[in-house]
Image (cartoon, grey):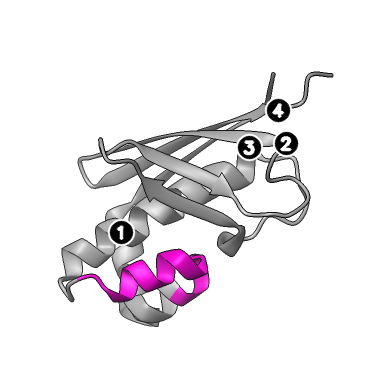
Amino acid sequence: MIIGIGIDILSIERLRGVILRRGSLNLARRICCPREFIEFKALPRIEDVQLRFLASRWTAKEAAYKALPFPRVTWKSLDLRYMSNGRPTLHYISRTTEEKVTLLLSLSGDAGVVVGVVVVESKSTK
């Protein structure tokens, strides 16, 4: 059963401005879960590579925040991964609700924006 839908649209130039003010490492430390932060630190220090990495996470997590009904969703409680075929997957990291919801994610980018849509499905049969 669908229990939430969220969408986020992010201007790449807006995020570039945030990175110029805060630094890419500081932004990554703020929005990445521990696994993602390790992945970020291993990226080549090429602005566009880091920008795409952070933009996809920002957008996916903002969309999930809007879709999830839980009051304590944080940047670090969401983990964006890519399957071997390139499909993005988003996981909610919580001991109490991890097995109760599935997050379905779609990401797309073009013309200087990234769009993320998250659908939250309940795994319970009630």
Q: Identify whether 87 is placed above or below 82.
A: above
Q: Earlier in the sequence, mark 3 or mark 2?
A: 3
- Looking at the image, which residue is at 29% across and 66% down? 16
Query: Position of 1 compared to 38: left or right?
Result: right
Number of residue marks: 4
CA gap, disc 3 to disc 2?
Answer: 14 Å
Q: Secondary structure at mark 3?
A: helix
Q: Are marks 4 and 2 in contact (CB under 8 Å)?
A: yes
Q: Check disc 1 and report the residue beneath it.
A: 53
Query: Position of 57 compared to 83: left or right?
Result: right
Q: Amino acid at mark 4?
A: Ser
Image quarter of residue 55: bottom left
* Label of residue 67 in the image: 3
Query: Position of 103 compared to 12: left or right?
Result: right
Q: Is residue 5 visible?
A: yes
Q: Are marks 4 and 1 in contact (CB under 8 Å)?
A: no
- Looking at the image, which residue is at 30% across and 59% down? 53
How many C-alpha atoms fall within 10 Å of the one at disc 2: few (<14), some, or many (≥20)?
few
Give the label, 3 or 2, closer to the camera.
Answer: 2
Q: Identify whether 16 is placed above or below 86.
A: below
Q: Give the quadrant of the N terminus.
A: top right
Give the label, 3 or 4, closer to the camera.
Answer: 4
Q: Amino acid at mark 2?
A: Lys
Q: Earlier in the sequence, mark 3 or mark 1?
A: 1
Q: Check disc 4 and report the residue beneath it.
A: 122
State which region is magenta: 29-43
Q: Amino acid at mark 1?
A: Phe
Q: Earlier in the sequence, mark 3 or mark 4?
A: 3
Observer-nearest of 78 and 52 = 78
Q: Check disc 2 and report the residue beneath it.
A: 100
